[in-house]
Amino acid sequence: MNEMSVPPVPGIGLTAKYPEIGTGPCDTAIYHDPAVYEKEMEAIFKRSWYMIGRVEQIAKPGDFFTYEMPTFRHEVLVCRDRDGNVNAFHNVCTHRGNMVEHRPEGHSQGLFMCRFHGWAFDLKGNLARIRDEEGFFGVDKACNGLKRVPTGIWQGFIFVSPTDEPYQSLEDFLGDQGRDTAGYPWGSCTQSYQTSMEVGCNWKLVNDSPAEVYHIPVLHPVSAAPTMMASGNVMGRLLDTEIKGNHRTNSHYSVMGEPKPVQKLAYFHAAAAQNVAVEDKGYELPVGINPTRSPYWTVDLIMFFPTLAFTLSAGMYTAHQVWPLSANRSIYQQRVFVRPARTAAERFGQENTMVEFRDIVMEDFSTLERIQRALDTGQIKQFHYHDHELALRHQHKVVTDILAAYDTEMEAQS
Amino acid sequence: MHSQTSKSLPPGFESIEPFVATWVLPDAAARMAQRQASRIEELRAFYNAMLPMGEAALAWLRDYELGALPPEGERLLKLMLALAEVAPAVEWYDDPRVFDGFPVERITYLRQIHDTAAQGLESAQ
């Protein structure tokens, strides 16, 4: 980028690209009504796929990790078998229902042994051994293996379905968004920090939080605003919002501002681990990332409806995941993925990235429980969305349309 | 104790020696907790001592691969990681906490990058 050139300030007109979405105020009932949440569980959550980890976590045969899916209270055991396959099972012993593997991650020699009575299952989930088997009354080992969880892999991410029969294939679920963002070097960011917190708000508010930048100059005046508002973009507008079915991408304008002193140390000594524009990436971005091919691009927010989004730049990305618990409670999990550091100096860059990102998200999240309180007490009945809050308006339409279609489906059945 | 403490960092970093006891911590979760438990004056004192040494520290650390640091180098790296944790408090908020933010003490770290161990460079994709 020529430092002397003045980048064009993004304009108004994103919403006009999608006339079917409308421009009016949006009813807030879907953000707090328990009956809506019950219906969302059937019509949306049970019909979606969920990312629960990456293949790097189980690089070798026998490697495993366990993961609880909060929305469904499913405890999942994921392992790699000796054929190299990634298998996921309900982590439930078929004898009496105890958890088979209690450790969060590790390596198995080939058997998972329940610590209750010692039933043992192999890496393919087969029931390999019943302790003191002669005391049972004809338990058929072939029928009592661990129950499989439908599993799919996209770009190294392990996805599972919460239902035994997935509503649609993982490929169809990811749709154009999955096709258009494949090819990004997802697997090169092998190092990750993962955090979790419970937030007293509806799951859609968590999605909304990073999905508009209308708030940037006001909510993030000293942290994110200096780069995203630089060179005249005083309203902090987006380059673009691109809608793809239920999914969407926000493409963020930003130019390098004057870094703070510690940022300057990190950028100079550990640029590879940083969330800054890189001139020579060494690869071509797929069409779905920086879709406008703007030279003033740094970050995209890539949303996979309903609960997974990536804040992604050329050299690193963060996965935001919300796990709905009720109409006004959610678990938010954040995974910051960075490239491996070789030297001790580069390790500093990773830490700078993680801490800054965490604190900026904490700035965002200051609003969530306050908004939910206003929703729960009936103090805000409508949301008025700005042109550059199109992503929120789109989410509102997607949810409303799915719930209406579900009603029609149920009526047709009865 | 004193003779041991005086050698706990590489030569040239004597000025930040007093911060070893407080800021050489096991991991990121402990650093976050230490920042939250400190007064802004304490964070500023640490930041002000560390910042002028930052270039020299990173130049020293650049010569070592992760996993191959001598103990004094591990302590120096951990002080720099603590500087990363403390920087937003001093540079952005003038407060240990995120200004008007969601309470960070409600965060649980589920997975952390090891402070000093070698990081696999291969991709499994």
Image (cartoon, rainbow, N blue to C red):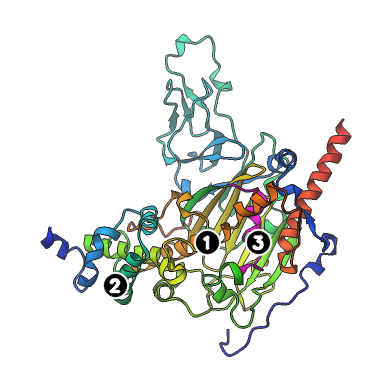
Q: Does residue A376 appear to the left or right of A96 in the view shown?
A: right
- Residue under pointer 2: B49
Q: Which residue is mark 3?
A: A211
Is residue A129 part of the magenta span, yes or no? no
Q: Find numbered disc 2 in the image and state the secondary structure of the residue it sits on.
A: helix
Residue A207 is inside the magenta segment? yes
Q: Nearer the viewer, mark 1 or mark 2?
A: 1
Neighbour tally class for label 2: few under 14, some 14-19, many 20 plus, Cα within 10 Å: some
Magenta-highlighted residues: A200-216
Q: CA distance from mark 1 to mark 3?
A: 20 Å
Disc 1 element: loop
- Quarter of the picture holding the N terminus of chain A: bottom right
Q: Is residue A246 above or below residue A1?
A: above
Residue at point 43%, 18% (across, down): A131
Q: Position of residue A16 (x, y in %)?
A: 82, 69
Residue in view at x 54 percent, y 14 percent: A139
In the rendered structure, which amino acid carries the disc numbered 1? Asp
In front of the other: label 3 or label 2? 2
Q: Position of residue B101 (x, y in %)?
A: 52, 59
Residue B100 disc label: 1
Q: Are marks 1 and 3 on the same chain?
A: no
Q: Looking at numbered disc 2 in the image, what kind of residue is underneath it?
A: Ala
Q: Disc 3 residue type?
A: Ala
Residue closer to the observer: A307 or A109 = A307
Q: Are marks 1 and 3 in contact (CB under 8 Å)?
A: no
